[in-house]
Image (spheres, rainbow, N blue to C red):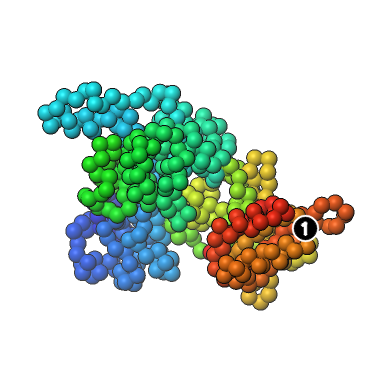
Amino acid sequence: MADRVLVAEAVGDSGLDLLRIAGFDVEVGIGWSREQLEERIAAFEGILVRSATQVDADLIARAPNLHVIARAGVGIDNIDVTAATKRGIIVANAPRSNIVTAAEHTLALLLALARNIPQAHGALTAGRWERKNFTGTELMDKTLGVLGFGRIGQLVAVRAKAFGMRVIAYDPYVASERYQNLGVEKCDSSDALYAQADFISVHLPNTAETEGWLDAQAFAKMRDGVRILNVARGSLIVDDDLKAALDSGKVAGAALDVFRSEPITDHPLFGYPSVIVTPHLGASTAEANDRAGYQAAEQIVAALQGGSVTTAINAPSIKPEDMEFLGPFLPLCRHLGRLGTALALCGSVDGIEVECHGKVAERDTRPLAVAALLGALQGHTEEHVNDVNAHAIAEERGIRVTETSSTTARDFTDLIRVTVVCGDGRTTVAGTTIGNRNRPHLLQAWGQRFNLQLEPHLTLFRYVDRPGVIGLVGTLFGERGVNIDSAAVGHSPDDGEQRDAVMILTTDADVPQSLIDEIIESSEYFIDGRTVALD
């Protein structure tokens, strides 16, 4: 008997045809009520949805035969991935379905912004011939700054270069070689981009770090008369600060496709003569909609016929016998990946090397390399990074991932070493697990060795080894109400020369960056300081 697939929302005919050609019994349930869905879901092995159908834990509990949930689109907010994973149900999406569409919409807004097309259209259809009021600017020889150089940002760059634009970009999680291959100039900081760009297009991921990225301080660093485009996420721009920059003339114009809350018809910038707005059309083309349905259908076919589900959100489980041994090392590897990239803080990550030493190397260590990659990339890419797509996303960004293993480990039974490669620079961190509860411990960072249990809030200082430095840090932490839980110090051998030391502190709360800056400025002996939040 053929597997049954429920298509709960409208998708293109190509997706439906693919499912039928594959031999599935396809039922289209568009318009079903929640009650109907709950009553009938038990009969299906697969379900294809868009954004309206809520595949929550209750519905999943009513679907004993369900093997795969496919989302025809990028977001998965309407699917309870945790509940599906517990049941062994694969959840997949179509993350590449709209990247061309989003890039093309960015270019459409770029041209409209440069040539005042919507404003001129509005005046002419209202009966006003105002040719002199809408003198535009050419794109040729202008500089486009791309903030976030992932898949969409790279497509925008290629298309902008066809107009004769100079393209610069900032994204430290893209290898230098990728910039070179696309003929795009790499900026080592967003400030460097602000200082050069005539147009700025934002393509950053939506994270706590990128919230309000374009604020008053950012606008102040930009060139006078800059124009801003946002076809990514509304939260990336502080609306009030953009409004002030437009009012002052610092920003000459803006094109916005996304907003902090949607749908919205009343916004402070609506009606501004120099602002172009569209109602989140970045992914809205017939081709993208059809492509999303087809790609989601492909994942259902793969899941139900034993193929490779290339866009799975929840990774296949590690074999039980391997999980028992490797499981405790997965959090350690994620921490090392995140810490290594935080300490490197380079212009671009070119490679990530993962070394496994000791008994752990006797196992299949690929999950450990993936975990390190997750730690390095999480929160820095356009789409959510998971165990399935981590290597693919790294490859798209030109980041080389290498894995090596050795069954010998000096001083410890097991040792994991992660190295972040940035050009000629290499930043290595190392760790292990200790005790019956396999607590993750940091053994090496910034070239120094120590042994400290990793906790969620970590602060590191590199300094010239002198008496009183540790006490100074403790005093300033205490004055600012920051409680130190534990500390460790590593330093070079005393050979009569100036030696550096590294101090690592764990605290019970985040350490504000202002405190780190204050400490570094308080003494000539401090070289660097970082605070890192581990999950």
Q: Quadrant of the N terminus?
A: bottom left
- Looking at this view, is 2 or 489 the one in front? 489
Q: Where is residue 506 shown, x and y percent of the image?
A: 62, 67
Q: Is residue 104 above or below residue 163?
A: below
Tell me: 491 left or right of 291: right
Say which amino acid is labelled 1: Asp
- Looking at this view, is 332 or 302 the one in front? 332
- Looking at this view, is 96 or 47 the one in front? 96
Residue 95 visible somewhere in the drawing: no
From this viewpoint, which residue is outermost toward the right? 496
Q: Residue at x 41, y 34 (%)?
A: 224
Q: Residue at x 47, y 38 (%)?
A: 194
Q: Is residue 107 above or below residue 401?
A: above
Residue 472, quarter of picture: bottom right
Give the residue at mark 1: 465
Q: Where is residue 462 shown, x and y percent of the image?
A: 70, 55
